[in-house]
Image (spheres, rainbow, N blue to C red):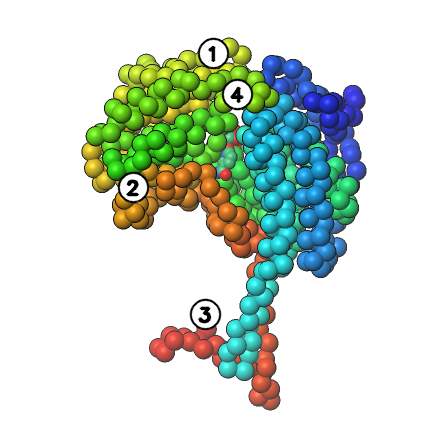
Amino acid sequence: MPDRTTVAGVAVDTRHFIGGERTASAGTFTDVSPIDGTVLGEISRGTPEDITAAVAAAKDAFPGWAATPRAERARLLRAIADGVDKRLEELAAVETADNGALLRSHRRGVMPRVAHNFRFFAERSLALDHEEFATRGHTHHVSWDPAGPSALITPWNAPLMMESWKVAPALAAGNTAVLKPSEWSPLTASLLADIAAEAGLPAGVLNVVQGPGSEIGDALTSHPDIRRISFTGSVPTGRHIAASAAAHLTPLSLELGGKSPLLVFADADLDLAVDLAVEQYDNAGQVCLAATRLLVDERVAAEFTRRLTARAAALRQGDPRDDTTDVGPVVHPRQLARIDGFVRRALAAGARALVGGGPGTGLYYPPTLLTDVAQDAEIVREEVFGPVLTLQTFTDEDEAVRLADDTRFGLAATVATGDPERAARVSARLVAGTVWVNCFYVRDLRAPFGGSRQSGIGREGGTWSFDFHCDVKNTVTVTKNTGTATRNTVTAPKGRPAHG
Ligand code: NAP
Ligand code: MG
C-alpha cells in the first residue's frame, strides 16, 4: 500500500501520525471525493492497537509539554498558524476535494480561520488569569494546570476548522492530543500533522489516528489515560461517547446537532431576512448551526416566501471548485440517502415543496424549501443536515417563541426584527447557545460557543476552552504566621459555616 496519495496536486500522507512518526495499519479504507466519485486515496484503517500507541505517545509527551513555558507553547502554535497560512491554497483545495464544500469559502473564510484559531488560543493562554484572593492571613492562588492527553473527535462538514478549534486550545492549555478525524474527510488532518512537525512541535504532542469511529472510537474514549474528550458530531454518537467516557468519569465537551429557528417578524427588513434564509443553504446545509426552521409572521409570509422561493431556485448548484457555484454536493451517498428519506417522508405526510423536493444528479441535492409542515412532523423535529428548510408561520411573538423553543435542541437561533426591544425580549426567551439578531454565523473566539439541551454539554471558546482542558487548582498559602497551624479561616457570610 502506498504511503502517500496526491490530491489536487498535493501529496498527502495516508498513514497515522503517532509519536512524531508515520505508521500504517494493515488495513485501509477508501476516501472518495463527493464532487465526482474520484478515489482520493486508500487511508490507514486504524485499530484499537493504534489508539493504544497514540495515547501512550500522548502520555509520554505530556510531562514535557505541560512543563514547557506558556510563551514557548504559544510560539509553536503561532508557527503552526504560519504553516497553515503558507499552505492555505493547498489545504483549501484538498479539503474541497475531500468533503465537497466550496473552494472559495475554504480559501477566503475557513482556512484563514484555521490559522486564526491557533493564533487566538496561543495569545489567550498567555492572558489567562492567575487570580489571587487574599483572606485573613492567607492567599488563594488560582492556577490553570494542564490535565493530560485530550481525545479530539471531529466531523466531516468542516474538518480542519473543527480540528484547529479543538487542537489549538488543548495544546495551548498544555495538554497533548490524539485527534481522530472523520473517515469521510481524513486528509487535511494529515496535512496538519505535517505542518505541526515542520513547525517543530515535539513528538507525541499531537497524534492523528485515522479510521472509522465505530471501530476505534471506544478504544479512545474509554481509555484510562485520556483526561479530556472534546467531541463534535451527532447526538447519537455524543450519547454513545458520554456512556463510554463514564467508565473513567472522563470530563467531556459535546458540540452536537441542531434544528435551529430563524424568526422573521413583520417589522424585519425583509431583504435582510431573505438573505439570512438563503444563507442556510451554505455548505449544502451541512452546518450544525443552520437555521433550518423558518418561522415567519403570517402578515409578511406571502411576500417573504415569494422572494425566498425566487432566490433559492436561482442558486447555482455544481462543482464546488467553480467560483460561481453557490451549492456543492453533499458529502457521501449515505448522507444523500438520509436527506432524501427525510424529504420523501415529509412529502408523504402532506408537506408541499416550494423549491426542490427530490434528488438531482450524483451527490447534488437541490436546495429544498418545504411548507405545510406540522409542528410535530419529523421534518420539523429532526436534524436533516442537508439543504432542506421548512417554513411555518406564526401570529404573534408568543407563538413565535413557543414554536422556536419547541425542540429538544438548543444550538442557535436567529431573529430578524427592526425593533430592538423585541430583539431583547425574544432573545432572552430563546433557549440557545448562540442567538443572532439581524445577522448569522458571526463568531468571536473570545465568546462562548456550545449548545443547550441536546445540542451539547459545555461551552468552548475564550476562557471556557481553558476551563475545560485544564484542571483548575486553588493553592492556599498562609501569609501571616500565627505560630499554630490554621484552618477554617475562610471569610464566610454571617450565619453560614466557614467551611464546606
Ligand atoms: P457523527 O457520525 O457523530 O461523527 C462525528 C465523529 O465521531 C466522526 O469523526 C466519527 O467518525 C466519530 N465517531 C463515530 N462513532 C464513534 C464512536 N463510537 N466513538 C467515537 N467517535 C465516533 O457525526 P457526523 O455525521 O460526522 O457529523 C454531523 C453531525 O455533527 C451533525 O449532527 C451536526 O449537527 C454535528 N455538528 C455539530 C457541530 C457543533 O459545533 N455543534 C459542528 C459540526 C457538526 P467516522 O466519521 O469515521 O465514523
Ligand atoms: Mg472524503
Give the mark nearest the N terminus, 1 or 2. Answer: 1
Residue at the spot of label 4:
325
Badge 3, how many Cα within 10 Å: few under 14, some, many 20+? few
Q: Nearer the viewer, residue 196 or 423?
A: 423
- Mark 2 touching mark 3, by CB under 8 A? no
Q: Is residue 65 above or below residue 151?
A: below
Under mark 2, the amino acid is Gly
Q: Position of residue 92 (x, y in %)?
A: 64, 30
Q: Is residue 169 left or right of residue 437?
A: right
- Mark 2 touching mark 4, by CB under 8 A? no
- Mark 3 touching mark 4, by CB under 8 A? no
Mark 1 CB lies closer than 8 A to ligand 2: no
Foreground: disc 1 or disc 4 = 4
The residue positioned 57% from the left and 48% from the top of the image is 250
Foreground: disc 3 or disc 1 = 1
Q: Is residue 296 left or right of residue 213?
A: left
Foreground: disc 2 or disc 3 = 2
Q: Give how far apart the Cα atoms at labels 1 and 4 are.
A: 15 Å
Q: Position of residue 236 (x, y in %)?
A: 47, 33
Give the mark nearest the N terminus, 2 or 3. Answer: 2
- Ligand 1 sits in quadrant: top right
Residue at the spot of label 2:
418
Give the mark nearest the N terminus, 2 or 4. Answer: 4
Question: Residue 266, located in which quarter of the rendered image?
Answer: top left
Foreground: disc 3 or disc 4 = 4
Give the mark nearest the N terminus, 3 or 4. Answer: 4
